[in-house]
């Protein structure tokens, strides 16, 4: 039993950590949950620099993300790595640059834009429904379909309905840059960026393509200002002198990265869970049929689809797409009775928090009624979109998009599990490893 002298909180010793290394790589969210179960609300990992703590108690999560958020910045390895592709757009920006940025970007998530999101979600879901109707087999990789759907919605919201012609190159370059981010996150030692390794070259190529595509888009939008796509709104800020061209580029790329795989992941897990729970699936089908009949959803339908909202929330409780968040400590602090030095790293895993026995009795049970009507939970107990001032700016975007898509899918199709052993793979988001094969029936 060797406990390094720098450890001042409960946590695994180096030998246990080494033995757990395979588990960490294979199933990091479960590993973090197991650490919380074994060691409690604050766990320290045997890492000397930076000192690293996992915080999982809902009240202390609330403290870090909301109550004392000014003492917890985003200058962490997680966000620095993401910034290789997104630059320091809104998601990766650290205080105080972030505050100004958020003010400028906020109008791009205005009510009018969200009502457009409903339209884009209907169009993209109808495309998926057509694909499913035309499929040669009744077993379909639904995760692949959800990725297409979410990419189409964020693409249309950013660039307008005819985005395909304009933005395909930009989106594929973003995704290719993201592959590098994932590869980097999985490798503890990474060669310096100037070395011409395959991954570094891939990143450079992706960023060059991105910058060229954004230049073209901006030039286009300056010449032909459109109605209210998000790019139009950002370019208006460029023209008004509130943003530089690089900032517009970073926000566009941030929206693509933050706004597509997250929603796809939430939808895939929701479909996986309803396929395993026929009663819940029936209830969501009935709600969709009652509210929508055979017509297309409209903005005002969202409020009437309360059960569908609860299903999506409960799916994100069990499988939070953003499964890990991180913060760097700016000044000495204290969490759960443990002194935390400036410069320490705080890790918060929504996955572990959402499986807290006290906040969520019978935590592994899929039970959407937890989110119906007046049900209450502590602020820090449910954090799929984060909490406090750095909370997801796209929360309404994602909820409207996801609920509309889920209602249409469950109205028109029945979903059953197949023999596939569905495994959660944590990368940028938590996704079903090898896709999600479901058996479909037309309803
Ligand atoms: C189910 C879907 C989504 C989930 C689960 C999700 C989750 C999150 C979380 C947890 C954060 C906070 C990160 C932290 O505190 O470190 C965040 C921030 C952010 N998200 Fe989302 N997100 C989703 C959809 C979207 C969409 C659709 C967009 C944009 C189109 C978006 C854009 C952003 C941005 C720009 C930030 C940074 C906000 C800031 O720091 O001011 N997200 N998201």
Image (cartoon, rainbow, N blue to C red):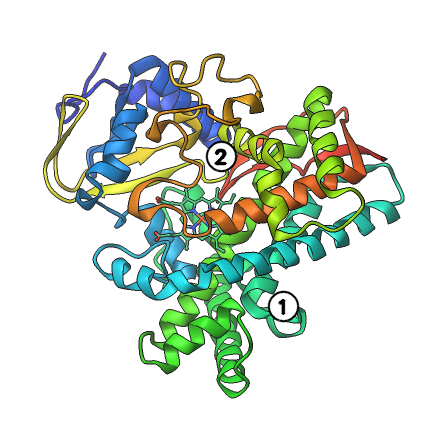
The picture quadrant where one finds residue 189 is: top left
Instruction: Look at the image and tell me in which quarter the N terminus lies.
Output: top left
**Quadrant of the snapshot with the C terminus:** top right
Nearest the camera: 411 or 192?
411
Task: Give the secondary structure at mark 2.
Answer: loop
> On screen, 316 above or below 262?
above
Q: Which residue is drawn at 49% across and 48% down?
A: 396
Placement of 127 over or under 326, stated as above or below: below
Residue 238 lies, in percent from the top left, at 38, 78
Position of 313 with respect to 131 (left or right) is left
Whether label 2 lies within 8 Å of ligand 1 gets the answer yes
Q: How crowded is mark 2: few (under 14 residues within 10 Å), some or many (20 or more)?
A: many
SS at mark 1? helix
- Mark drawn on residue 168: 1
Identify the residue at horizontal 47%, vertical 63% (top origin): 253
Answer with left or right where residue 290 lies relative to residue 339.
Answer: right
Q: Badge 1: how crowded within 10 Å, few (<14), some, or many (20+)?
A: few
Is 393 placed above or below 379 here? Answer: below
Q: Do the residues labelled 2 and 1 touch (CB within 8 Å)?
A: no
Q: Where is mark 2, residue-wise?
A: 320
34 or 404: nearer the eye? 404
- From the viewer's perspective, is 3 left or right of 275? left
| Residue at image coords 23%, 33% | 63
Residue 290: horizontal and vertical position, in percent?
74, 35
């Amino acid at each position: 039993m060797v406990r390094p002298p720098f450890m001042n909180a409960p946590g695994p010793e180096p030998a246990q950590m080494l033995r757990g290394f395979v588990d960490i790589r294979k199933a990091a969210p479960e590993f973090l949950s197991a650490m919380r179960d074994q060691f409690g609300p604050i766990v320290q990992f045997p890492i000397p620099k930076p000192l690293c703590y996992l915080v999982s108690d809902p009240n202390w999560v609330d403290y870090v993300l909301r109550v004392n958020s000014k003492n917890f910045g985003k200058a962490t390895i997680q966000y620095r790595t993401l910034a290789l592709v997104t630059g320091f757009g809104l998601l990766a920006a650290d205080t105080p640059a972030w505050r100004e940025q958020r003010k400028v970007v906020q109008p791009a998530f205005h009510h009018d834009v969200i009502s457009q999101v409903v339209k884009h979600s209907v169009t993209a879901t109808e495309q998926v429904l057509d694909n499913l109707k035309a499929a040669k087999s009744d077993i379909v990789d639904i995760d692949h379909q959800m990725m297409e759907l979410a990419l189409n919605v964020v693409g249309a919201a950013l660039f307008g309905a005819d985005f395909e012609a304009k933005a395909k190159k930009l989106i594929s370059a973003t995704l290719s840059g993201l592959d590098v981010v994932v590869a980097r996150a999985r490798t503890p030692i990474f060669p310096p960026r100037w070395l011409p390794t395959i991954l570094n070259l891939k990143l450079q190529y992706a960023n060059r393509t991105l910058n060229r595509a954004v230049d073209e888009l901006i030039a286009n939008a300056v010449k032909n200002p459109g109605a209210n796509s998000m790019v139009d709104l950002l370019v208006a800020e460029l023209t008004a002198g509130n943003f530089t061209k690089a900032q517009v580029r970073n926000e566009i790329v941030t929206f693509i990265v933050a706004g597509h795989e997250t929603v796809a992941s939430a939808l895939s897990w929701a479909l996986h869970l309803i396929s395993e729970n026929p009663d819940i699936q029936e209830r969501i089908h009935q709600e969709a049929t009652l509210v929508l009949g055979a017509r297309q959803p409209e903005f005002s339908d969202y409020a009437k689809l309360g059960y569908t909202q609860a299903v999506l929330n409960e799916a994100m409780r069990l499988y939070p797409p953003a499964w890990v968040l991180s913060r760097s400590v700016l000044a000495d602090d204290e969490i759960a009775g443990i002194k935390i030095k400036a410069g320490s790293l705080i890790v918060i895993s929504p996955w572990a928090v959402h499986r807290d026995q006290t906040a969520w009795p019978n935590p592994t049970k899929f039970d959407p009624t937890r989110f119906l009507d007046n049900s209450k939970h502590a602020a820090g107990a449910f954090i799929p979109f984060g909490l406090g001032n750095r909370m997801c700016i796209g929360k309404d975007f994602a909820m409207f998009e996801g609920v509309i898509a889920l209602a249409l899918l469950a109205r028109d199709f029945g979903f059953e599990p197949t023999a596939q052993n569905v495994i959660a793979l944590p990368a940028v988001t938590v996704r079903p490893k090898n896709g999600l094969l479901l058996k479909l029936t037309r309803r």
